[in-house]
Image: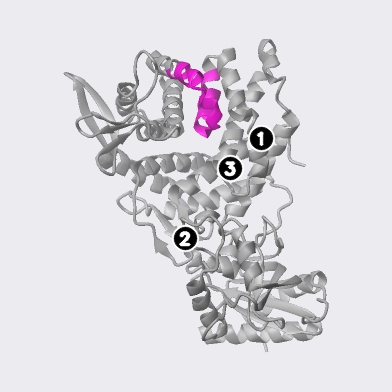
C-alpha cells in the first residue's frame, strides 16, 4: 500500500527529530513530542505524544496526527514536530510573577498543566491564541483566563482550568523541525529565546533577503482591492480585520511596494501598485487654490485633515514611480504637492506646521509627531533629485537650520537619516554630516539590544551606512568619523537585519493562527498581538530592500 501524504511528510522529519531529541530526566516522560499539521486554511491541529523510548513515542504521535487529519478531512501542507528539551516546575503564582516581568507576547516557553504532559501547550499555541495577552493597555504578559480556557477546551477537551496560586504547572523549552509539501527541505527551528519557533538562518544571504522581499510584497499585493484601496490590516490571533484607514500609510506603503517591485519585477505587484496609485491620485489627493492661478495639492486624511507627512510620502511614491517607469505623467502633481509642503513651512525659521484643516488650510496642530518633519524634508530632497528645482533644496536647507537648532538628532528618526543622506549627496557640508552622525551615534546599543523587531531601526542604519560610505571618500571630512565605532556600527546593522526575521510570518509560525493563508509571508508586530498592518509590512520591506543593496555591493563589512 502506498504511504499516505502525511506519512511521507512525517517520514521526512523523523531522522532529524530522532537525532536531535534527547530523553528527559525522571519524573517526566522520557520523550515528549508535539505533532502540528495544517492545510493553510485553518489553524494547526496539534497532538502530543509521550513515552519512554523514541520509537514508541514517534509511532504514537504519528498515529494521532493521521487520525486528526482524517477527522478534520485535512490534507496537510505543513507539518511540524517539536520535542521538549527541559522542564521547570513552578506554581501558578510564580508563573504570574514571571509573566509580570515579561513583555506582552514575549513569553517564549511552552506550558504543561501536569507532569506527564497530558495537557500541554507549545509556545506558539499560547501566543497565537492570545492566552497570555491582557490587551493593549497591559505592557507585560498576563494570564488571559478566558482565552486560555477557550483553547484548552478545543485542544484538550478540558471543561475547566483551575488557576490556583499554589498548584504546580510546568514551564518547558522545546525545539522543532518543519517541512511542507511545496519543498523537500527539512527546516530546523530555534528553541526558547528571542528566535524561538522560527527557522534557523545563521547568515542572511542575498537570496534569503530577496525571498523575504518577494513574500512581503506578494502579501501587500493581495491586500489591494479592485478599486485600489488597501485592506488596512489584520489581528491574526482571531482573523479580525482592522477597521480603520490612514491615507498617509496608503501612500507610504505604495512607496515600499515600488521599492520591492524594483527588486522583484513582479507583474502582479505592479498591477496592484497601479491600482493603488490611481486611487491615491484620483480619490485621496485634492487641489486647493493658494492664490489666483496658483494651486497646491494635498493628501486628505480622516477627519478632513491635511498632514505634512501625507504630502511627503506622496512625493516619495510618485518620484519613485517616475524613476522606475520613466513616465512624466505626475510631474505637475509633484510640483503641486511640494508647493503644499512649502505652504506648511515658515519661510524664515524653516519650521513646519504639521496638520491643517481641509479645505480652509487653517492650522489644526503646529506639531503632532516628529516623523512628519523628516518625511517632508526627505520627500522634497527626492523631488529635487528628480527635477533639479532649487526651490525644494532651499526649503530643505531652511528646515535643517531648524532641525539643527532644535537638536532633532536626539529622536534618532529614520526619516531624518534618509533625508540627511540624500541632502549630503548635493550639499556635502560638515554640519549636515555631523547631524547625520549624531542621529545614530549614541543609539547603537539600542539597535543591538532592542527586544522588539522595530523595523525602522534597520532603515535608520541603512541610510546612515550610505552616508558613512560617502564620507569615507571625502578626506577633508573623514575626521567626523573619529567618534564612530565602525565595527560596532556594522555589527549593529547586521544584528538588526537578522532580528527582523523574528517578525516574519514563516509558515512554521503562521500555521498556529486562525487563518494561516491570510498572513503567511507578511510581517507582524509581536507586542501588538502579532498585528499585521500595511505600514508594518512597509517598514520591514524598505529595510530589507536597502539591506539587499548593501549585501549585493560586496562590502567589506559583511556579516560573520
Mark before the other along the chain sequence, 1 or 3: 1
* Nearer to me, 249 or 8: 249
Give the secondary structure at mark 3: helix
Q: Is residue 167 magenta?
A: no
- For residue 396, which quarter of the picture? top left
**Magenta-colored segment: predominant secondary structure:** helix
Residue behind mark 2: 135
Residue behind mark 3: 544
Q: Is residue 402 magenta?
A: yes
Q: Is residue 180 visible?
A: no
Frontmost of labels 1 and 2 is 2
Residue behind mark 1: 444
Taking the view exactly as shown, the residue that stands out farthest to the top is: 476
Q: Which residues are magenta?
A: 399-424
Give the secondary structure at mark 1: helix
The location of residue 437, given as percent across then percent down, is 62, 24
Amino acid at each position: 500500500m502506498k504511504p499516505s501524504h502525511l506519512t511521507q511528510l512525517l517520514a521526512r522529519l523523523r531522522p532529524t527529530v530522532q537525532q536531535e531529541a534527547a530523553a528527559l530526566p525522571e519524573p517526566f516522560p522520557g520523550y515528549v513530542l508535539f505533532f502540528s499539521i495544517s492545510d493553510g486554511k485553518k489553524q494547526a491541529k496539534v497532538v502530543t505524544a509521550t513515552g519512554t523510548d523514541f520509537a514508541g513515542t514517534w509511532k504514537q504521535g504519528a498515529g494521532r496526527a493521521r487520525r486528526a487529519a482524517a477527522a478534520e478531512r485535512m490534507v496537510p501542507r505543513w507539518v511540524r514536530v517539536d520535542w521538549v528539551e527541559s522542564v521547570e516546575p513552578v506554581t501558578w503564582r510564580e508563573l504570574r510573577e514571571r509573566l509580570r516581568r515579561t513583555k506582552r507576547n514575549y513569553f517564549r516557553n511552552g506550558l504543561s498543566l501536569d507532569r506527564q504532559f497530558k495537557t500541554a501547550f507549545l509556545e506558539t499555541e499560547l501566543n497565537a491564541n492570545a492566552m497570555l495577552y491582557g490587551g493593549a493597555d497591559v505592557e507585560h504578559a498576563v494570564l488571559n483566563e478566558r482565552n486560555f480556557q477557550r483553547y484548552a477546551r478545543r485542544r484538550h477537551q478540558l471543561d475547566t482550568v483551575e488557576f490556583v496560586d499554589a498548584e504546580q504547572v510546568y514551564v518547558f523549552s522545546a525545539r522543532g523541525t518543519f517541512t511542507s509539501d511545496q519543498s523537500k527541505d527539512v527546516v530546523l527551528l530555534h528553541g526558547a529565546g528571542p528566535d524561538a519557533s522560527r527557522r534557523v538562518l545563521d547568515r542572511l544571504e542575498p537570496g534569503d533577503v530577496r525571498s523575504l522581499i518577494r513574500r512581503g510584497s506578494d502579501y501587500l499585493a493581495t491586500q489591494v482591492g479592485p478599486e485600489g484601496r488597501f485592506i488596512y490590516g489584520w489581528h491574526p490571533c482571531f482573523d479580525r480585520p482592522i477597521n480603520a484607514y490612514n491615507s498617509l500609510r496608503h501612500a507610504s506603503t505604495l512607496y515600499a511596494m515600488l521599492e520591492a517591485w524594483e527588486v522583484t519585477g513582479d507583474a502582479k505587484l505592479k498591477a496592484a501598485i497601479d491600482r493603488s496609485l490611481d486611487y491615491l491620485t484620483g480619490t485621496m489627493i485634492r487641489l486647493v487654490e493658494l492664490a489666483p492661478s496658483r494651486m497646491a495639492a494635498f493628501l486628505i486624511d480622516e477627519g478632513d485633515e491635511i498632514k505634512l507627512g501625507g504630502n511627503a510620502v506622496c512625493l516619495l511614491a510618485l518620484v519613485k514611480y517616475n524613476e522606475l517607469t520613466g513616465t512624466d505623467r505626475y510631474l505637475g502633481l509633484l510640483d503641486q504637492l511640494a508647493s503644499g509642503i512649502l505652504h506648511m513651512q515658515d519661510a524664515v525659521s524653516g519650521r513646519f506646521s504639521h496638520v491643517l484643516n481641509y479645505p480652509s488650510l487653517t492650522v489644526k496642530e503646529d506639531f503632532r509627531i516628529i516623523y512628519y518633519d523628516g518625511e517632508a524634508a526627505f520627500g522634497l530632497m527626492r523631488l529635487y533629485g528628480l527635477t533639479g528645482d532649487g526651490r525644494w533644496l532651499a526649503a530643505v536647507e531652511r528646515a535643517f537650520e531648524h532641525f539643527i537648532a532644535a537638536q532633532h538628532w536626539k529622536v534618532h528618526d529614520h526619516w531624518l537619516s534618509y533625508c540627511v543622506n540624500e541632502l549630503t549627496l548635493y550639499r556635502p557640508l560638515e554640519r549636515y554630516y555631523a547631524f547625520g552622525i549624531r542621529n545614530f551615534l549614541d543609539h547603537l546599543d539600542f539597535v543591538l539590544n532592542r527586544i522588539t523587531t522595530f523595523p525602522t531601526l534597520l532603515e535608520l542604519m541603512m541610510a546612515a551606512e550610505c552616508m558613512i560610505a560617502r564620507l569615507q571618500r571625502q578626506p577633508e571630512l573623514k575626521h567626523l568619523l573619529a567618534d564612530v565605532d565602525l565595527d560596532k556600527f556594522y555589527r549593529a546593522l547586521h544584528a538588526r537585519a537578522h532580528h527582523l526575521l523574528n517578525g516574519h510570518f514563516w509558515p512554521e509560525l503562521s500555521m498556529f493562527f486562525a487563518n494561516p493563508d491570510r498572513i503567511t509571508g507578511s510581517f507582524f508586530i509581536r507586542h501588538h498581538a502579532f498585528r499585521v498592518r500595511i505600514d508594518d509590512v512597509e517598514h520591514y520591506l524598505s529595510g530589507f530592500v536597502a539591506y539587499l543593496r548593501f549585501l549585493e555591493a560586496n562590502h567589506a563589512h559583511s556579516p560573520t
